[in-house]
Image: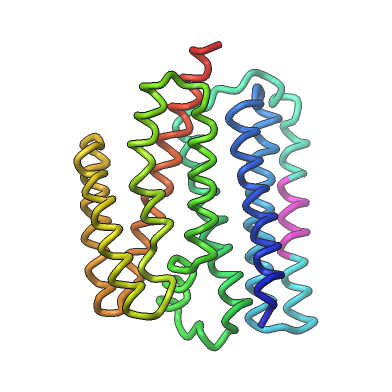
Amino acid sequence: MVSLYLLVFFASIMVTTIIGVIYYTETKVENYTQLFFSFFVLIMMSLMLIGAIVYLYSPSTFSLGIAVAINMISMIIILAFFFSVAENLSKQVIITNKINITFSILIVINEALMGGAFSLAQLGKYAFSNAVTDISISLNSIWFFYPMMIEMLFTIVLGIFLSKNEFYDLIYFALPLIAVSAFPPTILNFSLWTYSAIGIDIIFVAYGILKSNKTWKILYSILTLSLIPIIFNIDIFFGSIMSILMVFYYFSILPDLRTRRAHKH
């Protein structure tokens, strides 16, 4: 098992990188070449984490070779594609819904892979017994929720240019999901934390249901239902629903912030 301090250090680097990519994409990207760079960083990070999982699950020279090959071959293919279309990427970017959803999914995939890789490094491979357990541990890990929380808080920082009313709307929109990420019942395996966190989460999710639009009312209602199986030590539904909500969160909030920023200028 790897030192906790070392894991925190590497997690901090990865979270900072994702935040940097979000900031760069939201404030600096003007053409498809710059957009490609953002996607390239997220894809290579996810491949690096997959390589780390392969190696940590079965540490050996062979698995290290596989991990390196995954990254090198993928990088060569991606860069070859880039250079084949580079002359067409200089035009001004139009960020479509397809680009937005892909960007959002990539962010959450990186968070989920962080949960898997860092949990594997912390707990060892024997905690990962089957596919359902593997997914559940990855999506209910402190290494999944707290990086996610920090990245969501950063979207609040991106909203500082908004008017007072718009900024408060953003807070109302983001607060329930950030609060649930701060108090996930599944990260600690003792009853006091589990039941206390469930109670706190229900309060914030109820607030979200009252304050949010119709789509988010439905999503927050589903999130509330996913808290029930946790009482019976079934965590996978909660982690899965949270990951889906995170994709929808980025897909909803980042284009909205981008549009409002453009209007300010």
User: Could you tell me which quadrant the N terminus lies in?
Assistant: bottom right
> Compared with residue 168, is residue 238 higher up or lower down, i.e. above or below?
below
Residue at horizontal 43%, vertical 47%?
247
Residue at horizontal 19%, vertical 40%?
210
> Compared with residue 211, is residue 70 higher up or lower down, i.e. above or below?
below
Question: Of residues 21 and 83, which is closer to you in this image?
Answer: 21
Question: Of residues 201 and 62, which is closer to you in this image?
Answer: 201
Coloured how?
A: rainbow
Looking at the image, residue 164 sits to the left or right of residue 146; the answer is left
Residue 255 position in % (x across, y down): 46, 29
Residue 35 position in % (x across, y down): 64, 32
Residue 67 position in % (x across, y down): 72, 69
* Residue 77 sits inside the magenta stretch: yes
Question: Of residues 17 and 38, which is closer to you in this image?
Answer: 17
> Compared with residue 168, is residue 251 higher up or lower down, i.e. above or below?
below
Q: How many marks?
A: 0
Identify the main secondary structure in magenta: helix
User: Could you tell me which quadrant the C terminus lies in?
Assistant: top right
Question: Of residues 82 and 259, which is closer to you in this image?
Answer: 259
Residue range in magenta is 70-78
Looking at the image, residue 160 sits to the left or right of residue 24; the answer is left
Residue at horizontal 68%, vertical 44%?
40
* Residue 190 sits inside the magenta stretch: no
Instruction: Write down the quadrant of residue 81 in the picture.
Output: top right
Looking at the image, residue 16 sits to the left or right of residue 167; the answer is right
Residue 199 position in % (x across, y down): 25, 63
Instruction: Write down the quadrant of residue 198 in the picture.
Output: bottom left
Residue at horizontal 37%, vertical 49%?
177
